[in-house]
Image: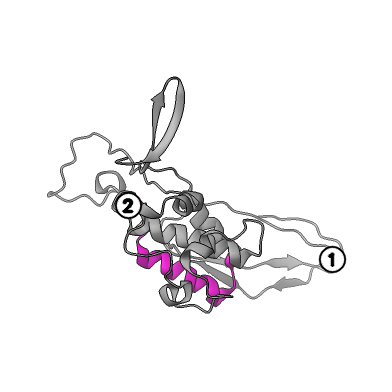
């Protein structure tokens, strides 16, 4: 961005929006000319944004197709990922797979979480509590989504665990909680809708 005129003790910020499809390093630098025509150039600073979610691409659309790919000129529909909310998993223990309500959060995620709660208790963490509590709630829901054959979740269980471990390493609990919450609230067929006398009832798939 720029150029801009800055008075003493003032600052300006520039923002660039981009859609990232892979881990990306952003690099920034600045140059200036003082009122005396003296020039100044800053050091560079960089920050790396890690791509934590594997984005599926279509070789027929991204230019990487080979003769083995069947590209007939038609476009492929994007994958419709799903996610059941923390509230859903709290209410439907019978839908859990691989993990049990009594399993310990620390043992599964390999982190030193406050209180080392059981998975069910972590799901009951208050939404307005500290960001680390919000993360434990969304992390358990994400883990259950990822381990369920009935949910087409965007993340694997290993990826969910990696996100949580990274959050504890960087202390960015809020960012990880927001990422997982977004995936957990996409909706899922395991809680499907049916009409009954003009009303909408919800029940676990198969009941």
Find residue 112 and report its horizontal and vertical position in percent: 53, 79
Say which of 44 and 118 sits in front.
118
Q: Is residue 161 magenta?
A: yes
Residue on which disc 1 sits: 35
- Tell me residue 141's x, y (percent): 45, 57
At x 28% / y 48%, what residue is drawn?
Answer: 63
Q: Residue at x 48, y 62 (%)?
A: 120
Q: In what element is the residue under mark 2?
A: loop
Judge from the rendering whether residue 23 lies leftward or rightward of residue 167; answer left or right: left
Q: Residues within 10 Å of mark 2 (few under 14, many from 20)?
A: few
Which residue is at the front of the view, 65 or 190? Answer: 190
**Left or right: 66, with 206 as reference point:** left
Q: Which mark is residue 56?
A: 2
**Distance from label 2 to label 1 (Cα)?**
52 Å
Residue 154 appears in the picture as rendered: no
Q: Magenta residues?
A: 153-173
Q: Is residue 17 above or below residue 112?
A: above
Q: Secondary structure at mark 1?
A: loop
For the point 12% across and 50% down, which residue is it?
68
Chief SS of the magenta region: helix
Q: Quadrant of residue 2?
A: bottom right
């Amino acid at each position: 961005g720029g150029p801009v005129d800055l008075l003493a003790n003032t600052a300006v910020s520039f923002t660039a929006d981009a859609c990232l499809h892979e881990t990306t390093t952003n690099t920034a630098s600045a140059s200036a000319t003082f009122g005396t025509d003296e020039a100044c150039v800053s050091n560079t600073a960089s920050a790396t944004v890690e791509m934590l979610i594997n984005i599926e691409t279509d070789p027929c659309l991204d230019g990487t197709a080979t003769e083995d790919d069947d590209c007939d000129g038609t476009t492929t529909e994007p994958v419709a990922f799903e996610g059941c909310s923390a509230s859903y998993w709290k209410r439907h223990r019978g839908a859990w797979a691989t993990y049990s309500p009594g399993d310990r959060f620390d043992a599964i995620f390999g982190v030193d979480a406050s209180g080392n709660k059981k998975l069910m208790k972590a799901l009951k963490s208050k939404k307005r509590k500290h960001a680390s509590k919000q993360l434990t709630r969304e992390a358990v829901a994400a883990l259950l989504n990822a381990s369920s054959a009935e949910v087409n979740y965007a993340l694997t269980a290993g990826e969910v665990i990696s996100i949580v471990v990274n959050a504890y390493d960087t202390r960015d609990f809020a960012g990880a909680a927001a990422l997982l919450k977004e995936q957990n609230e996409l909706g899922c067929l395991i809680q499907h809708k049916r009409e009954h006398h003009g009303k909408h009832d919800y029940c676990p798939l198969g009941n």
